[in-house]
Image (spheres, rainbow, N blue to C red):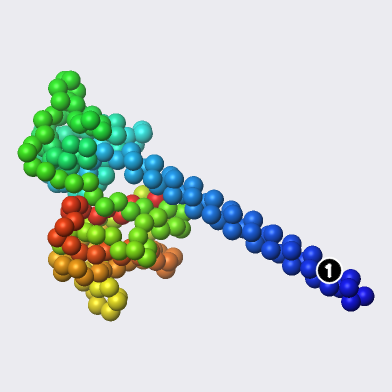
Amino acid sequence: MMSERMGRLRCAAYRAAAEAALLLIAALGLAASSSQAAAQASRNYVAYVESVSGRALASSDGAQGELDVLDPIHDGTQLSLAPDAQLRICHYRTHNILTLKGPLQATISAEGITAATGNAVAASKERCAAPVMSTVQGGFALRGVGRATNVALQPKIRIVNRTTQKIRKATLWDGTQGAIVVAFDGNVAQPQLAEGQTYALVIEFADRSEWKMMLRATAAAEASAVIVSVR
């Protein structure tokens, strides 16, 4: 009787261990697929909006929207500028600012910007760098939860929410989360940071869940922009 009971207990333990292993594999697979999707999306970005005045529209994958500061722009996006509009774009591959003035119809790619007339838009001599990109997808924080990411001393930070889930608030704290450095006004902030100090960017969602990204301020950082994309 005792041996039979021990055998049943061992079988139950093996079965529980197997089920736990399957759950772990499934979770890792979900995380990997989410990470791959986010990485693919980041690779498709070729520029971001440095500044915009007037009405500038972007059309991509059948969707159209008005461009705002620090909006990332996909490869192949169609741009349409109203007569009074001006759009300054940081292009990743060329590392230059490109300035567009309306009225204009153009297409942006990894190589540059081509107007509807077929003429390439000339880049300025003003240099820029690709932003720090972070993606929140499927409940997984896909960048920098425990490791601090280097940012400029006065970075422009933008939160791009591409989901139906509402963001209650976004806050930049000091490294110990004992004091608020800046509370976001809408989805953009540009704090003044201290050299070598670490900060915590915390996004709180409507369901009370939170996402955190650690930042370290340094004058050596090339990127002056931080874009967090919630998917």
From this viewpoint, which residue is outermost toward the top? 118
Q: Is residue 30 above or below residue 169?
A: above
Q: What residue is at 28 percent from the left and 60 percent from the top? A: 149
Find residue 122 and report its image quarter. Answer: top left
Residue 90 appears at what percent x and percent y? 17, 42
148, 186: nearer the viewer? 148
Q: Residue furthest left?
A: 125
Q: Residue furthest right?
A: 1
Q: Is residue 218 above or below residue 112?
A: below
Q: Residue at 29% across / 31% down in the picture?
A: 76
Q: Tell me if residue 178 can be seen.
A: yes
Q: Residue at x 19, y 23 (%)?
A: 116
207 to the left or right of 54: right
Amino acid type of the residue tagged 1 in the rendering = Arg
The crowd level at tag 1 (other Cα within 10 Å; few <14, some 14-19, many 20+) is few
The quadrant of the picture occupied by the N terminus is: bottom right
Asked whether, in this view, residue 47 is left or right of residue 18, the answer is left
* Res 60 quadrant in image: top left
Secondary element under disc 1, as helix, strand or loop, is helix
61 relative to 28 in the view: left or right = left
- Residue 64 seen anywhere in this rendered image of the structure: no
List the residue tagged with mark 1. Answer: 8
> Residue shown at 46%/58% (left/top)?
139
Q: Could you say where residue 102 lies in the image, as x and y percent from the top left?
A: 11, 33
Residue 85 percent location from the top left of the image: 12, 38
Q: Quadrant of residue 181?
A: bottom left
Left or right position of 208 against 76: right
- Residue 92 in percent (x, y) is at 22, 40
